Image: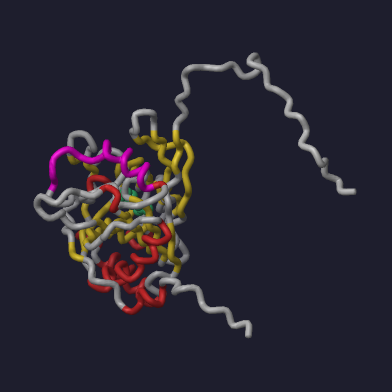
Amino acid sequence: MSGYAMEPAKPTKISFQALPPSDRWSPSLVVPAPVCRFEGFLGAERADALLEYAISRQDDFRAGTVSDPLTGEVSRKGRDSLVLPVASEVFSAHLADCLPLVQEVLGLRAVLDRSVTVLTAHGEGGHYGIHTDASRVRDVGTALSAVYYLHRRPRGFGGGRLRLYDTVVDGEGRARPAETYRTVEPEHDTIVFFPSCAFHEVVPSTCPSGRFEDHRFTLTTWISDREPAQGAAAPREAGGSGPWQWMARAAEGTRPLGEHGRDHDGAHPVPLPPPGPAARRLAPGPRAAQHDG
Ligand SMILES: O=C(O)CCC(=O)C(=O)O
Ligand SMILES: [Fe+2]
């Protein structure tokens, strides 16, 4: 005799009084952003060298700006960060090597071949309010944001976590940040990748010493595709599967009006190199044959 009933129990009916019928049905879809992280991205030695470089450029950082999604107006509203546009062949090569694996994990098929990078620093009261990175990329529906973190040990700042919000897609297909989010700790020598169309926020940081070397540093990169050839239709299905199709469609509304040739913090796009041999080491190969014999 098993402990399970052999026949399914007759279900108890929920009356219309308990659950009234309605001709209105308008739930909101909540889509979590796909995300992945790497630890020990550059390795201890190079991470420290890069941190020292960032610290040495203190006088060249400027106040970071935001671009209004509707008007394209550039201001400092909702943001207190220092930025310095940069370009590094070594860093770009590392990104290119990771990209095949990142795209596989995040379910993104698009061909991404250029990047825009800035160094940032957050000190006492540093923050960056809820936004998408639509103003940084050509096609927000297929672009990736990558944030690489650097800091002195022991850590000289508090707070400064990254919140990656779920996306609410409303009945009209528009996007807004959900109340729910994933928290990313800004750990030294780690990098996080997420869709540029995902709402995110840097919560306020503290920096008790007030010293620049104790700030929260990042190398923030936006990775996207090049301008499509003249007359070529943008194939939407060339983007991604899963959450991408929902988030990307919804994020159309967060794209700034008008074309901006330049990043609003003065950063310039550089082509990404093709992935090197390191990419083959990173990506899991075809499943190994079983040695059972
Ligand atoms: O610093 C971070 O964690 C994220 C920065 C960011 O969202 C941005 O620069 O657009
Ligand atoms: Fe951002």
159 displayed left or right of 53: right
Q: Residue at x 9, y 52 (%)?
A: 230
Q: Residue furthest top?
A: 17
Residue 179: where, in percent of width, then height?
Answer: 46, 36
Q: Residue at x 29, y 72 (%)?
A: 275
Residue 276: where, in percent of width, then height?
Answer: 30, 76
Q: Is residue 258 above or below residue 45?
A: above
48 displayed left or right of 72: right
Q: Nearer the viewer, residue 50 or 115?
A: 115
Q: Residue at x 15, y 54 (%)?
A: 227
Query: Which span is picked out in magenta?
Result: 244-260
Q: Is residue 33 above or below residue 104?
A: above
Q: Magenta includes 35?
A: no
Dividing the picture into quarters, in which one does residue 7 lie?
A: top right
Q: Residue at x 29, y 68 (%)?
A: 96
Q: Is residue 72 above or below residue 45?
A: above
